[in-house]
Amino acid sequence: MKGFLNFLILWLISKKSMTGAEIAIELEKRKGHKPSPGTIYPVLKDLKDKGLLSVDKNKRYSLTKRGQKQLEAHINTFFETFCDIDEMRSCICKK
């Protein structure tokens, strides 16, 4: 799950710079529950330490060029793994 959380955070931040609290709210909208600061901030620190995110004086996180490349790699892996996602979705929607 940690790897998937990294992916989601990179994806959310790729749309616009966000604070940790804003990221938590966006994740809540998608997952149905708000992750705790103890879940979000260690991931943000790890991504920043790896050079994938930068943070400004207002504590808004943004993707670095390296982060953008990492996100693109995650997206490619996701679609390679779930290349038949539309077929999977159609099975669920028929029920």
Image: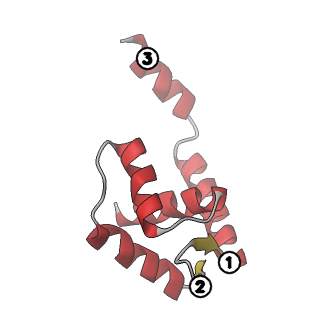
Query: Residue at image x 49%, y 62%?
Result: 9
**Figure quadrant of the C terminus:** top left
Q: Position of residue 5 (x, y in %)?
A: 41, 61
- Residue at (30% x, 58% y) in the render: 35
Q: Residue furthest top?
A: 94
Q: How is the image coloured?
A: secondary structure
Which residue is more in the foreground, 35 or 21?
21
The secondary structure type at the circle numbered 2 is loop
Select label 3 or label 2 by which is in front. Answer: 2
Q: Three-letter amino acid code at disc 2?
A: Gly
Percent across and percent down for residue 27 are 41, 52
- Name the mark on residue 66: 1
What amino acid is labelled 3 in the image?
Cys
Residue 37 is tagged as none
In this rendering, would 38 be left or right of 29? left
What mark, if any, has residue 93 been given in the picture?
3
Give the labeled residue for mark 2: 51
In the rendered image of this protein, does residue 67 appear above or below residue 36? below
Marks 3 and 2, the one that precedes in the sequence: 2
